[in-house]
Image (tube, coloured by chain):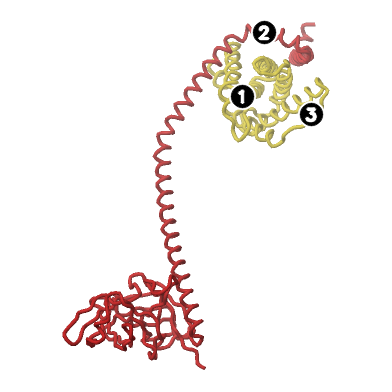
Amino acid sequence: MRILKITLLILGSVILQITLIARIPLFGSRPDLPLALVVSVALFRGPLQGELVGFASGLLCDLLSDGQFLGIQSFSKTAVGYGIGLVRGRLYSENLITQLVSGFIATIVVKVVTSVHLSLLLTDSKFLSIRFHGLILAAILNSIITIAVFWVVKRSAKSER
Amino acid sequence: MFVFLNRYRTIIVFVFLCIVSLALSWLTVGKSYSNSIKHSLSIFLIPVDFCSSVISSISGRASHVGAAFASIFREPVEEAKLQSLESDLKSLKRQLDEERARNSRLEELCEVCTNLTESNPSFSLIPAKVIAVEPTDWFRYLTIDKGRSDGVATDMAVITRSSFAVDTSHPTGAIVGRITDAQENSSRVQLITDRLSVVAVTIGPLDDLVLLNGRPETEDCVIDEVPSTTHDMLKDGNVVKVDERSSIFPPGMLVGKISSIERGIHFCRIRVQPAFRFARLREVMVVAVLEE
């Protein structure tokens, strides 16, 4: 049952990301709903679930994206899911500040990892240039929606008990 | 072995997933692998594609409905804005027309002044605006915005441009009245249509000297008791000018034209229409005589 719920959450976040969110830019940037889900699951469940959800949602995003590469988003989201899950034991995950900061840092880490990954794959340093203005804006948006997604994950876990 | 795997389960899964991701990315760098891998995995995406297409169509229709709904409210707002803009433009056009008319009047008045000062170098002209006309003094008095501080004094002549041309196509000056009361910054002007106004004028081909009196009730002037020897040579439309011996008004300046002649046996009464239009009197000139 839990696996089904997580699967539905992953599918729902990816579908919403590629349909609705892709059409509605907010101040020139877009939030990353699957990433918010990865952070929320990692904060709530720990590193194992975090990396698995990260891998699945990342791979699904790679498959549904127009890009030719697979494994780019899955790698970065796996790393983020594992990293955020590791700090779960050290921080109070239900604190709003923790969720905000986790979402913010996760966005920056995903962007940096993706840029390095692409530059190494294609041996082209142009992927190392990052638009900081857009990155900060996206990080702020992601940190805000992480709070909402965390609440959804928590509610779905409560209904299991 | 199992204890080891169980203890380090998380990190082992993490490493495995990273290797898989890196392998996928490395394999798909070359295009041929990318298409085949994507094609083989596409079967799992059928429900995702279906859901995403449904949501996309719903969101597309919703955006059309929202745009149509918003246009209902936008049209009246835009119409109100257009109406407001139209009234602003009309107001601006009125102002522009007024300014153009004023500009035209001032140009003609300027030409009148130039002609006057060229023919009479002893004259100095003080421009003034009509600032007040009291209803009880209609066609009798008006107030201008120049006074003693501007060099205006009692009994100075006030002129303006004529409302009709006389001999040439150039604008002609016409007398309006004289200063009766000069305050510090304003002055009162007695019009030639005032009952108490008397102006020495000449009429007819022989320039007969007669006295012009004002008639505010009929908005014109009259010349009474004109001898028959004079009025026989007069007709409607004849010009009436200031006599050269006038001590107040510039000699030869236009007063008006004959509008009607009431002929009697020995005398006649001549009605004279002033050369200025009272209703359009805005700018005037005060004639100051330079002391030699």
Q: Amino acid at mark 3?
A: Lys
Answer with left or right where residue B256 lies relative to residue B89. Answer: left
Q: Identify the colour of chain A in the image.
A: yellow
Real-space Cα separation, disc 3 to disc 1, in angstroms: 26 Å
SS at circle 3: helix
Residue B68 image point, x, y percent: 43, 29
Where residue B41 is drawn, which disc sits there? Answer: 2
User: Residue A92's quadrant in the figure?
Assistant: top right
Dot 3 or dot 1: first in sequence order is 1
Residue B7 visible to an observer of this rendering? no
Q: Identify the colour of chain B in the image.
A: red
What residue is at 50 percent from the left and 92 percent from the top?
Answer: B291
Where residue A33 is drawn, which disc sits there? Answer: 1
Real-space Cα separation, disc 2 to disc 3, in angstroms: 30 Å
Label 2 marks a residue whose chain is: B
**Residue matched to label 3:** A126
